[in-house]
Image: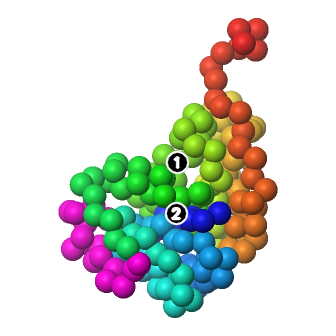
Amino acid sequence: MKAIAVFCGSSNGALPSYKRGAELLGKELARRNIALVYGGSSIGLMGTVADAVLEEGGKVIGVLPKFLRDKEIAHPHITELITVDSMHERKQIMEQLADGFIILPGGSGTLEEFFEVFTWGQLGLHQKPIGILNIDHYYDLLISFFTHMNEQQFLQDKFVKMALVDSNPAHLIQQFYTYSPPEVKTFLKKSQT
């Protein structure tokens, strides 16, 4: 595990525990000599996780679309800033650089990034672990919705298990080392294979 992409909010959220969780994740990444790949911003939880990695002497690679350089305030002190033309290119580069993915609390953009890499995993486009850092129960409803999708037969058992969940950064990353990707999604019936 050389690099993990982290998707998270460009604000700090309502609870101080979100920021503290981002700090703990950043420190854990640096402690394990895992580079952070993230959105390149200096604000919100994005800036917090990057700062924590840097404070511990770790490597931080930001990927930021040109049009967000001023809105999200590009982090001036990260190891490397890659500027891209679009949000789609941002996700592609982050996926290519990362050996796994973690989401911290965030809004619709964070969920969109999470679901894109999750779907890519279902389709076999990558076999990398995907983690949900469930700080202060932030993602309880999302986790429940995965169960609902499964019960309604829109998400197979093997894909429910694809999302690794923990509230402790060290425990979540540890799960990455033993992750075994599911078989690729297929729409063929067993009798057709």
The circle on residue 117 is 1
**Label 1, residues with CA under 10 Å away: few <14, some 14-19, many ≥20:** many
The residue where tag 2 is placed is 5
Q: Is residue 2 above or below residue 121?
A: below
Among all residues in the image, which is located at the extreme right? 178
Amino acid at pointer 1: Val
Q: Which residues make up the magenta segment? A: 64-79
Q: Is residue 65 visible?
A: yes
Q: Residue at x 54, y 38 (%)?
A: 125
Q: Which secondary structure, mark 1?
A: helix
Asked if the magenta segment contains residue 72, the reply would be: yes
Color style of the picture: rainbow
- Look at 75% across and 47% down and name the residue there: 180
On residue 105, which mark appears? none
Question: Residue 119's spot in the image, x, y percent?
Answer: 54, 41
Q: Quadrant of the C terminus?
A: top right
The x and y percentages for residue 39 are 40, 67
Q: Is residue 142 magenta?
A: no
Left or right of residue 40: residue 59: right
Q: Residue furthest bottom?
A: 55
Q: Earlier in the sequence, mark 2 or mark 1?
A: 2
Q: Secondary structure at mark 2?
A: strand
Estimate the spatial distance between the alpha carbons at disc 2 and disc 1, rounded to whole Å.
10 Å
Residue 61 in the image: x percent, y percent? Answer: 43, 70
Judging depth in this view, the residue of 8 and 100 nearest the camera is 100
* Residue 150 figure quarter: top right
Q: Name the outermost residue toward the top.
A: 192
Quarter occupied by the N terminus: bottom right
Residues at circles 2 and 1 in contact by the CB criterion of under 8 Å: yes
Residue at x 75% of width, y 60% of height = 177
What amino acid does circle 2 point to? Ala
The foreground one among 136 and 31 is 31
